[in-house]
Structure formats: structure tokens, C-alpha cells
Amino acid sequence: MHPCPYCGASTRTRTSRDANDTGTIREKYYQCNNIECSATFVTHEFVVRTVCRPQPTEERGVVPADAFKSCHRGRDQLSLPLGDCASQSKTVHYARVPFG
């Protein structure tokens, strides 16, 4: 999350997309949470350097990509079927709060 460059308030990511053909740069659109400012701005996110690269060993091996659920692969997020991860969802209980 980037703070608003105009008023310093918190912001939310509205959408993002690949900014290049290799998928190494993301273009993110942010909107300011301050209703009086309401600025919308774009940032680019990319990997600067790798701190630690995973080293596969014979004991661990490499986990094949098809072993992950499609919702954990991260490429087709806009067309993600909701039922794919439904078994892991938790029940949410809402309480009515009286106003006044």
C-alpha cells in the first residue's frame, strides 16, 4: 500500500495488470481513502533483487505446479472459479448492532 502522494492518507488498490510481456512488472491503480482528496494514481511494482533463492534438494524435490490449486497459482485471478477454494472458507457470523 502506498500512501497518497497528495494528502498522505491511506489508499486502496483498485486494480492491477501486467505492464510488460514477461509479467515481471505490475502496474497498480490506487485510490485515496480520504474522500476530500480522492486522488487516483498509478505505480509500477517489480522485483529489484533476490535475497534468497530456494535451492531444491533431493529430499524435498520440486513441487509440480499442477499440485497447487488453481487459486494458488496466481496467473488467472480474474477468471478464478469461486468453488475451487470454497472448502477452505470459514463461516462468518454477523451480529446486529443497534444504532442510536
Image (cartoon, rainbow, N blue to C red):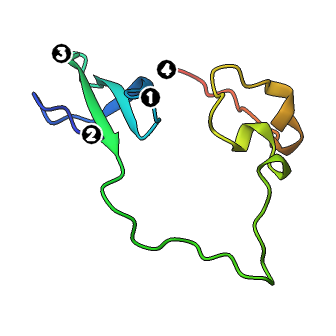
* Closer to viewer: mark 1 or mark 2: 1
- The spot of residue 50 in percent (x, y) is 39, 65
Q: Amino acid at mark 4?
A: Gly
* Closer to viewer: mark 1 or mark 3: 1
Q: Which residue corresponds to the image point at 85% horizontal and 52% vertical from the top-left?
A: 67
Q: Earlier in the sequence, mark 3 or mark 2?
A: 2
- Residue marked by disc 4: 100
Q: Earlier in the sequence, mark 1 or mark 2?
A: 2
Q: Which residue corresponds to the image point at 46% horizontal and 35% vertical from the top-left?
A: 22
Q: Which residue corresponds to the image point at 79% horizontal and 24% vertical from the top-left?
A: 81
Separation of residues labelled 1 and 2 (CA atoms): 25 Å
Neighbourhood count class around disc 2 (C-alpha, 10 Å): few under 14, some 14–19, many 20 upward: some
Q: Amino acid at mark 2?
A: His
- Residue marked by disc 2: 2
Q: Residue furthest right?
A: 87
- Residue marked by disc 1: 21
**Residue nearer the viewer, 89 or 61:** 61
